[in-house]
Image (cartoon, rainbow, N blue to C red):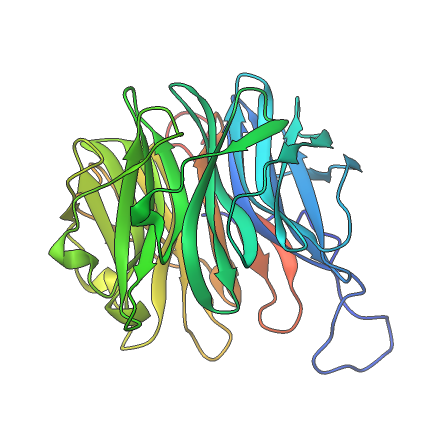
Amino acid sequence: MEQPAAPGPSGPGPSGVFCSPCHAAVEASLAAVAAAGSTYVAVGIEFPPPRAAAWFSGDGTAWHRSAGIEAPDGSLMAAVGAWSGGFVSVGGVGAGAAAWTSPDGRTWQQGAVQAPETSGTVRMDAVVSGPAGLVAAGGASAGSTQIGALAWTSTDGLHWTAAVNAPSFAGGTIAGLAAGRLRVVAVGSVVSADGAVSGATWWSADGRTWSPGLAAPSFSGARLLAVTAGGPGFVAVGTADGGARAAAWWSVDGIKWSPAGGGPGFTNFGQRISMTAVTNGGPGFVAAGSRDSAGNGSAAAWVSGDGMTWQRVQDPVSFGGAELAGVVSGAPGVVAVGAIGLPDNWAAAAWLSRYPGPGA
């Protein structure tokens, strides 16, 4: 991965003023990235006050802030995807879910999201263009308690209808979505009545009605955080052993799952490590995430040729004090997004890894 290009407005403290730690007047963090051809769009949040924000790039290195965006205080963009209408982003405003659409990543229009019949704070955390239209998913929570997973569908990105509240959604949350030829696959986690956490998957032909995938033994103590289509069928990534180990899984049909091979690159000397995003393209599969390191944390990345065996890549210097939250394969190469300057000065950042070949 190359040195980061920081698209955010964050920067050093005022000249001549000693500060420890220093905080920029406006800080930002990117949560997700999508690509359509050579155009990349990244979304996230800037603060204070917290407000959804988006950036766009034609090459993955030079980024520009999206000025035309309907984003009230208390809003955030948590996920973004490309579709036939351009780009769609989902997240939340206050205690409710929210969605936006853009033809080019430069100007954004906020849509209308049907409120589900549930209590707590509702948020969309994933979005994908599926066989029957757009699908978004997330969950409802009360503080740190997961109330239940949720899903929505849309044909235009502006009007979202809540899906049927499946019994298997109880106590769950959906963190990632991927679309295959026949179905949409959702991954996330479920918390049982006694507080035990386990990974979970669901699938749907139309995004309106959902069925649970088969629970694998390796899901115990795990959280599935992202999924992509390709390779054997679908590949999911996340964390296992209560956060002490990065983890990946693969599935032919999105229903039955098997753990991928990891090795030493999946552990971090007993400290936290996780894969938080995954993409299919270029050299194969690329996963992005973070790990605990010297109190500030550090970004981490992995590669796989088939989605079933993985190897962690060597950390560039720019991974120190950073975290990767999203990754996508586009025309120029693989772009990962997140933030640098952790834990005191959050600045939105992007990294580009060009595909091998002439001029790379």
Measured from the top left, where is residue 291 in percent x and y?
Answer: 39, 67
Question: Residue most toward the top?
Answer: 84
* Residue closest to the eye, 287 or 239: 239
**In the rendered image, the vertical position of residue 74 relative to residue 284, given as above or below:** below
* Residue closest to the eye, 207 or 342: 207
Measured from the top left, where is residue 181 in percent x and y?
Answer: 29, 19
Q: Is residue 283 left or right of residue 14?
A: left
Question: Residue most toward the front?
Answer: 117
Measured from the top left, where is residue 224 in percent x and y?
Answer: 31, 53
User: In which quarter of the view is residue 278 placed?
Assistant: top left
Q: Is residue 341 left or right of residue 187?
A: right
**In the rendered image, the vertical position of residue 310 relative to residue 281, given as above or below:** below
Mark count: 0
Residue in view at x 80 percent, y 82 percent: 18
The C terminus lies in which quarter of the figure? top left
* Residue closest to the eye, 18 or 236: 236
User: In which quarter of the view is residue 21 placed?
Assistant: bottom right
Measured from the top left, where is residue 172 in percent x and y?
Answer: 36, 55
Residue in view at x 36 percent, y 58 percent: 171
Residue in view at x 77 percent, y 60 percent: 49
Q: Is residue 28 left or right of residue 251?
A: right
Residue in view at x 67 percent, y 68 percent: 345
Question: Is residue 12 among what the camera can see?
Answer: yes
Question: Is residue 281 among what the camera can see?
Answer: no
User: In which quarter of the view is residue 298 placed?
Assistant: bottom left
